[in-house]
Image: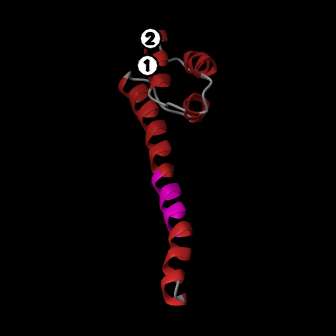
Amino acid sequence: MRPSARIPSILAGPVLSAAGIALAVPAAHADMQACEQYVAQQKVKVNSDIVQACHVGQGGDKTACVSSLQEAGVPNKAAAHACRLSPM
């Protein structure tokens, strides 16, 4: 293989990897926002406790997410739904 043909193929791997990481990060952030926005729609003021609970839900611990949201004043069904909006 000619050196001029090798250079683009060598650079393609890191570029594609970086693009994949860049696409995954906004999706995770959007899930947390969906959780927070749903809580806000339930007429509950979003504070740092709610943001943290949505973050916990995104990490995969739905039980802790629901419990934390309930402690912050979110009704049971709304808390469960909000935590489902922040998938792992």
Predominant secondary structure, magenta span? helix
Q: Quadrant of the C terminus?
A: top right
- Disc 2 vs disc 1: Cβ atoms closer than 8 Å? yes
Q: Amino acid at mark 2?
A: Lys
Q: Is residue 30 above or below residue 4?
A: above
In this rendering, the count of numbered labels is: 2
User: Residue 44 location, x and y as percent?
Assistant: 44, 24
Tell which of 21 and 6 is nearer to you. 6
* Residue for badge 1: 81
Badge 1 density bin: few <14, some 14–19, many ≥20, Cα 10 Å: some
Identify the disc placed on residue 68: none
Magenta stretch: residue 21 in it?
A: yes
Q: Is residue 12 above or below residue 61?
A: below
Q: Residue at x 41, y 34 (%)?
A: 34
Q: Tell me the magenta residue range.
A: 15-23
Tell which of 7 and 44 is nearer to you. 7
Q: Residue at x 44, y 28 (%)?
A: 85
Instruction: Left or right? Give the position of 79 relative to 72.
Output: left
Q: Quadrant of residue 61?
A: top right
Tell which of 34 and 24 is nearer to you. 24
Identify the disc placed on residue 77: 2
The residue at the far front in this view is 1
Q: Amino acid at mark 1?
A: His
Q: Residue at x 49, y 10 (%)?
A: 76
User: Residue 71 location, x and y as percent?
Assistant: 60, 17
